[in-house]
Amino acid sequence: MIKFEKVSKKYGKTLVLDELSFEIQQGEFVVLIGPSGCGKTTTLKTINRLIEPNEGKIYIDDKDITEMNPVELRRGVGYVIQQIGLFPNMTVEQNIAVVPKLLKYPKDKWQTIVRDLLEMVNMPYEENAHKYPSELSGGQQQRIGVLRALAASPPIILMDEPFGALDPITRDTLQDEVRRLQKKLKKTIVFVTHDMDEALKMADTIVFMNEGKILQMASPEEMLHNPAHPIISGFMGKQIDNRSNGLTAGDVMRTRVVKAARNNQTLKSIELMKSRDVDTLVVINEDDTYAGIVTIGDLRAHGRGGMEIGKLITDAAPVVKVADDAQEAFDALLTSSTSYVIVLNDDNTVAGLITKTSMTRAMGEVLWGDVTS
Amino acid sequence: MTLIDFLIENQRDMTNNLLRHIELVGISVFIGIVISIPLGIVLSRHRKLAGTVLAIAGTIQTIPGLVMLGFALIFLGIGMLPALVILSLYAILPILRNTYTGITEVDPSYTEAARGIGMTNMQMLFKVELPLALSSIIGGIRISTVYIVSWATLASYIGAGGLGDPIWTGLATYNTKLILSGAVPSAILALVLSGLIGLLQRILTPRGLRGVRV
């Protein structure tokens, strides 16, 4: 656990960090984001004491880091930088093993570590260990940069815009890999970026900073839905557009649903379907809560005259809540074998349906404004 | 009598001159290295001091060799010792300057990474900075060596011997062959040493650094 307690940093008269207080839990992926000069990189570098604050305390696992030897501290905290900083005079193997060697691990131990780590990012040892950084692509170099930070298994890893200099496709792959490694190895990661897409994708918690202060510290969903400050909304403008415009399932559903009680009989139900020109009924319980669906096919194949339709219902249709993101509903619709998604109210009564038609209309409205029906 | 015949005839003298010359160059460049590299490292840690020290070293470099040898003669007398003192002083600047710039021009991303992963200052110096500056430092040694080969010819003025002996004697007696028997070997010596050090520079540069800007 990392704890900041009223940490301030001044350069001359400029206040870079202004009484910063927050906590990072063990195993948490925390992304520091904000406009340039907001203090995010400074915050990161105070954790491994590359920058010493003027005031305030930082604790790692309740230990004041100013009481630790900075060299020892840094060997226990992985560090990845944007410029990658692989030592060009060392091979891939020597670069990865550099911290284990500083810590005087025996040779067989660090060699095993190098092999295991390279395997983890699908860069076979035989092919890569003896190459020099200049013989690798940018993406491969930063993979090795990440492995170097992991080599001595530090519980905490600091990453300063690690993928900022990579092309978008490589960046995407590396983001996935780091997220996967973090989940697998249960590391606490503090990650600095100025890219909101990256923050939303990677973070458990996003810390949004401006002028040395925290404007908001929240989960990606929370920040997306309730940005606490206009600066944050401004930063996320693009993402809100990308993410279905904040539309909920309730916004895009149709509310005219043909419902039938579960004790309805089959013949009557078929007539109802014919009269309303639908092939499926939404079946509800006595208390109006959702029970399931029944299709004309099911009725014809298994129904006998006088049978209650409650016996034929299935739960084949995906179900979402009214407040859920429309995108989720669309995803469910696209991956389901049925041609609709059931939308429920909070009390599990049926609120409406999303069909492929209502989905198309919602998307059309996003693209072109109101679509006449 | 051709120059070749002359050289064969005076083989022993010529060999002695050449060996003495190599001795002068070797010792003074070695002293230059021993002083300059540590000093360059210290200066890279105290960059405010560096300007002053490099300026002083640069000034020494501009004092004509004969004047310096004159001073040496006054204070230290004649022979090998004063010559070595002066030549060593001249050897310092190129090595010092290249050590200093070699270290200070190491890309900050390497030193930041080194510090960030927990290297001590000494580890950073020996594992990162010096290896990356090595090529530049050897380049400085190469420049010093070539300079000293030529300046060492002046050393015969204060009785240190070397290839300067036949040159100055030849000049005094209008003996072209004598002049050439000193000048040609010293020119060849400069070229050969420069080539050898260049080779060393290439061998000592790690594979990963060849063709890469540090």
Image (cartoon, rainbow, N blue to C red):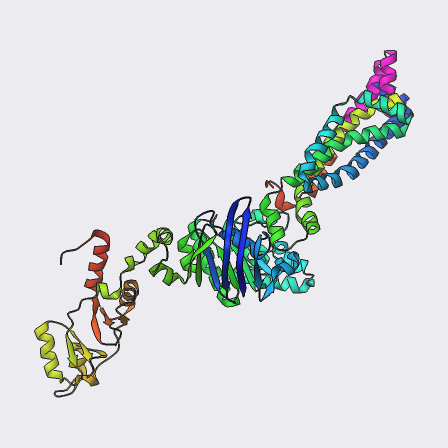
Residue under the image location 74 percent in, 35 percent down = B196
The quadrant holding residue A312 is bottom left
The answer to whether B129 appears left or right of A337 in the picture is right
Locate the N terminus of chain A and report the quarter of the image it occupies. bottom right
Q: Horizontally, is A277 left or right of B181 in the view? A: left
The residue segment tinted magenta is B161-190
Q: Quadrant of residue B156?
A: top right
Closer to the camera in the image, B173 or B101: B101
Q: Residue at x 67, y 43 (%)?
A: B205
Give the residue at x 59% y 60%: A77
Q: Is residue B76 above or below residue A199?
A: above
Question: Is residue B120 part of the magenta span, yes or no?
Answer: no
Q: Quadrant of the C terminus of chain A?
A: bottom left
Asked whether residue B104 is in view, the answer is yes
In front of the other: B193 or A233: A233
Residue at 21% across / 72% down in the picture? A351
Q: Position of residue A32 (x, y in %)?
A: 47, 56
Which of the 4 quarters of the picture holds residue A363? bottom left
Instruction: Point out residue A150 in the picture as x, y percentages from the top left corner.
Output: 57, 61
Residue B174 horizontal side relative to residue A200, left or right: right
The furthest residue to the top? B174
Decide: is B81 above or below A15.
above
Query: Residue B20: where, in percent of width, then height?
Result: 87, 29
With respect to residue A276, does B140 lie above or below? above
The question of residue B176 being in magenta is answered with yes
- By secondary structure, the bulk of the magenta-drawn segment is best described as helix
